[in-house]
Image (cartoon, grey):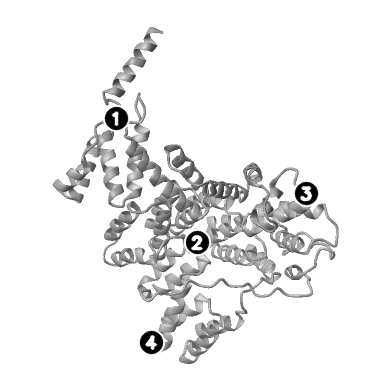
Amino acid sequence: MRAVRVLAALVLTAAACGVRTPSPVDVGALVRAKGEPEARFALKARIFADPRDVQARLALAELDDTTGRPTEAIEQLDTVEHLGGPLGVRWHASDRDRLARLVLARGRMRLARGAATALADLERAQHLGAKPSVDELVSARVATALADLRQVDDNLRTRGRTLLASLAHDAKPGTDEAAWTGARAEASTAEHGAFGAWLWTVGAKREAYEQLARWHEATKPPRDEAFQAAYLRAIAWWSPFWLGEVPPPPAEDLVGPERCGFPGADCTQPPIEELPLPPLTPDQNRDTAAARYASTRVPGATSASLAPITAAYRRDPAIADRIALELVDRAVDAAGTHAVLGALFDALGDPARARMHWQAAVDASPEPAFMRGLAESAAHTGDGPAAIVFAITAAASSGDPAVVWAAVADDLVDANQLHDALTASRSALDLAGPDVLPHALDTAIAASRALGRTQQADAMLVQRAQLAPRKRNDDTEVRAALAAHREHPTASTVAGLWVASRALPRDIESRAVLLAELEADDPRRQVVIDELLLLAGDPDPARALAATLALR
């Protein structure tokens, strides 16, 4: 007992004497004496010589904060917090407040793109003394629940339902909050239907199917038209009707416009509606296509901030690296900036640098989109086994695994990693719905033929012939024009391809051929360049990247 009292006295004495927290460095005086660059260099030199130099780290964090380098400031303050000490974290109240403010800003940025990691940042900022709003905390919990509900794993989806159910309160009919009541264990049949229909709209397709199937089993015709339409969309995605492995739903279920997507229906589905493309700005041209592509991959990025990197990359990639790292240091959220840079180097045709940045993005905030970027960049580098490992995680958390597997399979074929491409294709084929299945089969057929597996390719070609995929537009004319030009290229076939491409405004292949064939002074060439630049911002990542690479 006496030893405890002595220790307590020592603690109080140490705290009173200022031993717990070192005296702060006068950053202002240091900058006035040396200038900002030299002051920064001096502080970093101290940290390099002694990684446990808390004074230098706190001073560097202060300098970073005042000069607009929040990522580096957070890094230094995180290290100080982790270093700790027998008497606690050795910092001042102003340092703690600084970290709280910076982490809160980062959490808000992650919340803006719906990242599940936003909740940890907001709660940490709250613990440090910042004050996120109640609405922000609720929104972050919803983002966390949705991330779980998009998972393949049953336990994670159960956790997501539990969290969302805890947030379901009295809400106006027709709102998202009203749909969440279907997450409760005691939810009614209609609530399960509404919950499933809402889940489909937010990309949680597996959970949507299960909720809608539960609603369907508990009801009889005539059913609610909106829920029945959602059910047909979900069952078309889930069940392998398209290759004849299971019979289609009974005739009593095939009602409304959604029935047109099933084999043997007496109607055809309308073309898929295309989302509008981001408009071009006056400063965007062929040289800024990579920056435009990358800026549309992650919310909040701007092509203007990336243009200097693309310009520097053409001169010397090492200069581009320095500018890119400077951009990361000045970012509020390093994860999002690393992801944008990963996409940028993808578009510049530098898979090694792209992979480095995608990995950094995943390390900072393991979001499904970032993991997919890492999987695809690994495929681009020719590292098939790593691409498969990363794709497993990306697919499981994406909400629609087949989309990820089909994209990675494509990239592996392009990188001539054919055995791994077939592995990815098998996963895509096992999980694909009607929109993904035709393309997944095309990729598997190409890989099989390249490996000399002719019999396997022929069998899949028979399956492919059974499919009538839902198209955005009829591409028959442009495919015929491409074939004619390849067989015997002339000015006439180029003219025919130009005419055909007008009817298919988002076709990349025809525009890439035209760009290569048209003379520099041909006015059609600039039209094609502008169209490809527009398509570099397409919501479909594969199409956008293809357009960007065509411009290179």
Task: Quadrant for residue 213, please give it.
Answer: bottom right
Q: Distance between the residues labelled 4 and 3?
A: 66 Å
- Depth-wise, is mark 3 or mark 2 nearer the camera? 3
Indicate which disc, 2 or 1, sits on the residue closer to the N terminus: 1
Circle 2 Cα neighbour tier, 10 Å, few/some/many (<14 / 14–19 / ≥20): many
Query: Residue type at mark 3?
Result: Ser
Q: Residues within 10 Å of mark 3 (few under 14, many from 20)?
A: some
Instruction: Check disc 2 and report the residue beneath it.
Output: 411
The answer to whether the residues at label 4 and label 2 have Cβ atoms under 8 Å apart is: no
Distance between mark 4 and mark 1 Cα atoms: 70 Å
Amino acid residing under circle 2: Asp
Q: How far apart are marks 3 and 1 (CA)?
A: 58 Å
Residue under label 3: 188
Q: Is residue 61 above or below residue 401?
A: above
Q: Name the residue under label 1.
A: 21
**Which residue lies most toward the left here?**
33
Residue 107, given in percent of the width and then of the height, sits at 46, 48
